[in-house]
């Protein structure tokens, strides 16, 4: 049968069974702190669990889900997590070229999970081994300052290919990117949103490459791809 997995806040991770007539029946409930967002990469569910940080759940038996791993988002144990969004991306191996110089070295293929802390922003993990998430960025040394006038809202991970110019010049480049929506408050009480773009091609050295105005008090972010011949374009949608 088919199952739906729902991040139900204080109700935890709920599993619903889709019956043959389309009815939904409860199959299981996994208690958590505050299930805010869930992504499925079979056979695991990755959960943004509010103060519980990132939680990894084995769902091979949907009627008996079980926690197999997880990680805090903050490195300071005195600071409480506020995990509100989660996104996943399988990062394929690619050449580690230095500028225009070719290289025989390649990066490792891995499954990336990004979790968004409402107060401090995105955190990137390698979950190739789901029971032991490895924190990739930001590094554990030092912490990012929490700003009272800033709230992180939306999150997406996506790969994108920049096609080479027809007449030469820039070469074709494939990269992986993290997109995060952040809301800043000014002294007048206005809430301005911005889309921050990070280059995650080297996830241990992720860097911000763009900051685009996204209107006022924008709450959500969704990633979509559209074929505009001859290119496949990545578009971020904000309501």
Image (tube, helix red, strand yellow):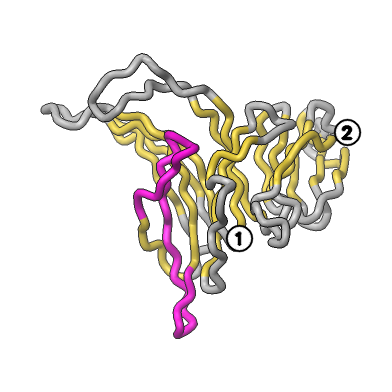
User: What residue would you read off at disc 2?
Assistant: 64
In this rendering, position of residue 213 left or right of residue 138: left
Q: Position of residue 103 (x, y in %)?
A: 32, 18
Q: Callout 2 environment at 10 Å: few (<14), some (14 to 19), or many (20+)? A: few
Q: Which residues are magenta?
A: 184-210
Residue in front for this viewpoint, 121 or 27: 121
User: What residue would you read off at disc 1?
Assistant: 118
| Quarter-of-image position of residue 146 | bottom right
Tag 2, which secondary structure? loop
| Quarter-of-image position of residue 147 | bottom right
Q: Would residue 150 be counted in the magenta stretch? A: no
Q: Callout 1 environment at 10 Å: few (<14), some (14 to 19), or many (20+)? A: many
**Residue shown at 81%/57% (left/top)?**
10
| Quarter-of-image position of residue 118 | bottom right
Tag 1, which secondary structure? loop
**Residue shown at 50%/41% (left/top)?**
157
Q: Would residue 192 be counted in the magenta stretch? A: yes
Q: Position of residue 80 (x, y in %)?
A: 71, 60
**Residue shown at 40%/42% (left/top)?**
199
Determine whether 206 is above or below 162 in the image: below
Residue in front for this viewpoint, 160 or 203: 203
In this rendering, position of residue 50 left or right of residue 121: right
Count of labels in the image: 2
Determine whether 108 is above or below 84 in the image: above
Q: Position of residue 76 (x, y in %)?
A: 67, 56
Q: Quadrant of the N terminus?
A: top right
**Residue shown at 51%/45% (left/top)?**
156
């Amino acid at each position: 049968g088919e199952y739906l997995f729902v991040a139900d806040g204080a109700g935890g991770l709920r599993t619903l069974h889709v019956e043959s007539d389309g009815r939904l029946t409860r199959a299981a409930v996994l208690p958590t702190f505050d299930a805010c967002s869930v992504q499925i990469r079979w056979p695991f569910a990755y959960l943004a669990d509010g103060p519980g940080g990132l939680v990894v759940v084995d769902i091979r038996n949907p009627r008996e889900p079980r926690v197999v791993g997880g990680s805090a988002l903050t490195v300071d144990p005195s600071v409480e997590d506020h995990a509100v969004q989660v996104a996943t991306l399988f990062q394929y191996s690619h050449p580690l070229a230095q500028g225009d110089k070719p290289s025989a070295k390649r990066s490792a293929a891995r499954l990336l999970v990004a979790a968004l802390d409402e107060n401090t922003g995105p955190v990137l993990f390698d979950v190739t081994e789901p029971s032991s998430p490895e924190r990739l960025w930001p590094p554990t040394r030092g912490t990012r300052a929490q700003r009272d006038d800033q709230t992180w809202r939306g999150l997406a991970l996506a790969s994108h290919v920049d096609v080479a110019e027809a007449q030469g010049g820039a070469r074709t480049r494939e990269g992986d990117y993290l997109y995060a929506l952040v809301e800043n408050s000014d002294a007048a009480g206005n809430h301005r949103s911005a889309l921050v773009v990070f280059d995650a091609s080297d996830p241990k050295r992720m860097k911000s490459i763009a900051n685009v105005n996204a209107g006022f008090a924008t709450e959500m972010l969704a990633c979509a791809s559209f074929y505009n011949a001859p290119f496949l374009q990545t578009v971020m949608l904000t309501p």
